[in-house]
Image (cartoon, helix red, strand yellow):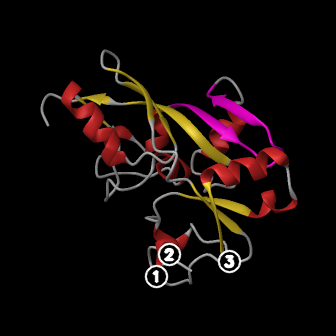
Amino acid sequence: MSRAYGSFGRTTPPARHVLQAREAIAVLESRTACAGMMLPYGNGRSYGDSCQNQDGAIADMRSLDRIESFNPQTGRLVAQAGVQLTQIIDHAAPHGYFPAVVPGTRFVTLGGAIANDVHGKNHHRRGTFGCHVEAIELLRSDGKTYNCTRSSNARLFSATIGGMGLTGIILSATVRLMPVGSI
């Protein structure tokens, strides 16, 4: 098994069964038996080794790494869950925008930042990452994709932010970036 799926704290062995993102999506959409025993895996930077699933499978979401849209007037960005915060920074900074919350590393995925509801050094001013999420596209084990916002599928939206991947697999998200005077 590849060390690419080991835990960040190196306290647990790497996952036994790994599905790539497209394969995991197909499994969930077909509602096969192992769908309920699958956890999403971003870039493996979660403290506490939360990306591990010794008795099930992990879904490597890193190939879903496309920024779908960015509005340089509003700072609204739509991206797939496997996009790393460093990619968002590289894309938005030239336009004067930056993620409102960045944890100790910018090498976390968008899906991971949401699932862990990460915080940064500015949490007393900006809150957690979830405070800046506008929408989540979520694939659940029932094979259905849900578009979740604070007003549509609101309970699922709230449970997914900080839900550690237990509500389903985040496919994409819409986030509000903050304007910055200089980088």
Residues at badges 3 and 1 in contact (C-beta under 8 Å)?
no
Query: Is 143 included in the stretch rendered in magenta?
Result: yes
Magenta region: which residues? 134-150
User: What amino acid is labelled 3 in the image?
Assistant: Gln
The residue beneath circle 3 is 54
Q: Quadrant of residue 52?
A: bottom right
User: What amino acid is labelled 2 in the image?
Assistant: Ser
Seen at 46% across and 82% down, the residue is: 10
- Give whichever of 42, 121 is nearer the camera: 42
- Give whichever of 169, 101 is nearer the camera: 169
Q: Determine the CA span between mark 2 and mark 3.
A: 11 Å
Q: Is residue 173 left or right of residue 32?
A: left
Residues at badges 2 and 1 in contact (C-beta under 8 Å)?
yes
Q: Is residue 128 above or below residue 60?
A: above
**Location of residue 73 in the rendering, given as x and y in whole percent from the top left corner:** 31, 15
Query: At numbered mark 3, what does the secondary structure look like: helix, strand or loop?
Result: loop
Query: At numbered mark 2, what does the secondary structure look like: helix, strand or loop?
Result: loop
Q: Is residue 107 above or below residue 3?
A: above
Q: Earlier in the sequence, mark 2 or mark 3?
A: 2
